Image (cartoon, rainbow, N blue to C red):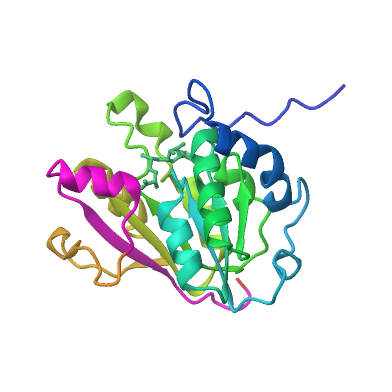
Amino acid sequence: MTADPAPRPLRTFGRRRGHRLRQTRSTLVETLLPVLRLPPVGLIDLDALFPAPKRAVWLEIGFGGGEHLATQAAAHPDVGFIGCEVYIDGVGSLLRHIDRLGLENVRVHDGDAREVLARLPDASLQRVYLLFPDPWPKARHHKRRFISPSALDMLSRVLTDGGLLIFASDHADYAHWTLENLTGRPDFQCLAGTPDDWRRPADWVESRYEAKARTAGARCFYVQFQRQERTPGL
Ligand SMILES: C[S@@+](CC[C@H](N)C(=O)[O-])C[C@H]1O[C@@H](n2cnc3c(N)ncnc32)[C@H](O)[C@@H]1O
């Protein structure tokens, strides 16, 4: 008798593809994506992932069109970047930025970020960006939000001591949800005080979704959580 397969986690995303991929993106998905894709199975060896050694590895979950990721990667060539996105048009858009900028420090997972979190070594990431995640505003859909106790356990495992979870949203309820989920956890410390402190940091790189939200006059919330030092032996 075989054991029941583990239940699939709930989807935290909407559609995975649009109508038809534009020609340039489609070509890059066929040619460049296979080169930049993470190895398909097993523990991810971060030392072997990039052509040159990196001082740190940063992960972006749900990079959308990849504008933030590409700008950060161009500004920090000594850092390795892993980008995760399920929407293939967004992956194609990131590939176009990588190609145009000649970036050599980005690797891509065209799938659910939780698959990557499960395969990363302990204490291996210095930063994780979760920018404007799908807010799933209806109460019956809250369970689809990326921030959940199980996702935070995964993030806690892969972040280094002192590593940062960097969150932004234009959805006040999701911002409060995030704070509630992290408050009381001994492994994370919120670096902002009251919601009035949830302002955009000075050296911030704007994402595409954020630019749209700000143009539409939405209030955006920015907050960072720091992975606390691990207690030896626990
Ligand atoms: C509202 S968009 C924001 C995109 C981008 N971060 C920005 O600020 O422009 C949220 C993105 O997260 C992606 N996403 C949601 N859940 C995901 C998951 N579990 N793994 C990877 N990507 C995910 C969606 O496909 C979508 O492109």
The stretch drawn in magenta includes residue 217:
yes
Q: x, y (%) of residue 70? A: 48, 58
x and y percentages locating residue 31 in the rendered image: 71, 43
| Quadrant of image for the C terminus | bottom right
Seen in the image, is 205 located left or right of residue 87?
left
**Residue at 46 percent of width and 50 percent of height:** 66
Looking at the picture, does residue 115 appear above or below residue 79? above
Give the residue displayed 60% in from the left and 52% down from the top: 117
Front one among 113 and 55: 55
- In which quadrant of this rendering is ligand 1 seen? top left
184 and 198: which is toward the camera: 198
| Residue 92: quadrant of the picture | top right
Which portion, as a residue range, is magenta?
205-233
Q: Residue at x 52, y 61 (%)?
A: 101
Q: What is the x, y in percent for residue 43?
A: 75, 56
Task: Based on the picture, tell me whether residue 175 belongs to the magenta stretch.
Answer: no
- Quadrant where the N terminus is found in the figure: top right
